Image (cartoon, rainbow, N blue to C red):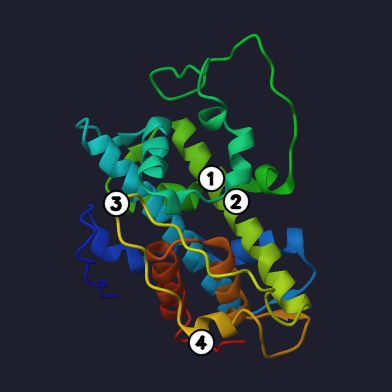
């Protein structure tokens, strides 16, 4: 398989092959969707959902890699994840995972050992286990594959966080896609976009993109590719990451029918 050319704004190791990596298989995507909805998930929808999950995780890993590189490290830690999100608010996805990860739990009092494993404390946390968190371990192999494609490794705590973020993000994506199908199209979600201080605001979304949120074709028993594209617009804010995710999801489904 011929590698895709690297995007100029990305400079990580093996970036050119990122589009060739398919760490989150359609079968895994469908398993997550089954936890959320009894609706059928089309082949192209599963590929689109796998693609956007890959895109989001790749961007997070790339941001963390850059943070680690500033300290001449190639092994990522939870601190690098926090730095990546702090520097790019678009990467703040899968937020429900934050309530279950020591990385995001106030940070004070959380201690990691040399391998990035949380040192147990006397205070015991709650045992809330929503379905997205229970199934987070399913993404470990894909996360490690993405890490290798970026030329880095990660401590166990970092892998766990990426696992959890991927699981929650895909679960939320499934819920939104199912909502789009049930309601015959997305509700009016507005066109608010976020821009970093001192940077120009991203361009407004084309009218065609907004119309895609209000109308859909097909039955109300099957989640199709266009329903995933509408859910991507709901889940991802800002401009850069959303547009990249949409473009790569479309590219990933070029050989399949939109349904």
The residue drawn where x is 29% and y is 51% is: 198
Residues marked 4 and 3 touching at CB (< 8 Å):
no
Q: Is residue 170 above or below residue 160?
A: below
Query: Could you say which is closer to the camera, residue 122 or residue 151?
Result: 122
Q: Position of residue 71 (x, y in %)?
A: 22, 30
User: If you read the primary sequence from the N terminus, does the residue marked by circle 1 or circle 3 appear first?
Assistant: 1
Say which of marks 2 and 3 sits in front: 3
Q: CA distance from mark 2 to mark 3?
A: 33 Å
User: If you read the primary sequence from the N terminus, does the residue marked by circle 4 or circle 3 appear first?
Assistant: 3
Q: Which quadrant of the figure has residue 112? A: top left
Give the labeled residue for mark 3. 198
Give the labeled residue for mark 4. 208
Say which of marks 1 and 4 sits in front: 4
Give the labeled residue for mark 1. 163
Query: Could you say which is closer to the camera, residue 216 or residue 153?
Result: 216
Q: Which quadrant of the figure has residue 121? A: top right
User: Element type at marker 2?
Assistant: helix
Q: CA distance from mark 1 to mark 2?
A: 6 Å
Q: Position of residue 76 (x, y in %)?
A: 35, 35
Residues marked 1 and 2 touching at CB (< 8 Å):
yes
Q: CA distance from mark 4 to mark 2?
A: 30 Å
Give the labeled residue for mark 2. 167
Local crowd size for mark 3, using a 10 Å CA cut-off: few (<14), some (14–19), many (≥20): few
Q: CA distance from mark 4 to mark 3?
A: 29 Å
């Amino acid at each position: 398989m011929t590698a895709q050319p690297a995007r100029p704004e990305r400079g990580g190791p093996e970036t050119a092959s990122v589009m060739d990596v398919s760490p989150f298989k359609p079968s895994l995507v469908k398993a997550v969707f089954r936890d959320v909805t009894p609706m059928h998930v089309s082949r192209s929808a599963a590929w689109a959902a796998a693609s956007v999950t890959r895109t989001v995780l790749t961007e997070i890993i790339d941001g963390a890699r850059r943070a680690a590189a500033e300290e001449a490290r190639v092994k990522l830690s939870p601190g690098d994840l926090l730095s990546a999100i702090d520097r790019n608010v678009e990467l703040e996805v899968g937020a429900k995972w934050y309530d279950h990860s020591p990385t995001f739990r106030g940070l004070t009092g959380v201690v990691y050992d040399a391998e990035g494993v949380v040192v147990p404390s006397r205070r015991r946390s709650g045992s809330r286990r929503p379905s997205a968190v229970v199934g987070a371990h399913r993404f470990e192999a894909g996360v490690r594959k993405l890490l290798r494609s970026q030329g880095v490794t990660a401590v166990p705590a970092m892998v766990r966080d990426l696992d959890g973020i991927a699981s929650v993000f895909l679960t939320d994506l499934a819920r939104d896609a199912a909502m789009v199908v049930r309601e015959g199209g997305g509700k009016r979600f507005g066109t608010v976009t976020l821009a970093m201080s001192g940077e120009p605001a991203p361009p407004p979304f084309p009218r065609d993109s907004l119309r895609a949120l209000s109308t859909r074709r097909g039955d109300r028993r099957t989640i199709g590719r266009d329903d995933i594209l509408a859910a991507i617009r709901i889940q991802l804010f800002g401009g850069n990451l959303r547009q990249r995710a949409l473009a790569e999801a479309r590219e990933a489904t070029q050989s399949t029918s939109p349904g």
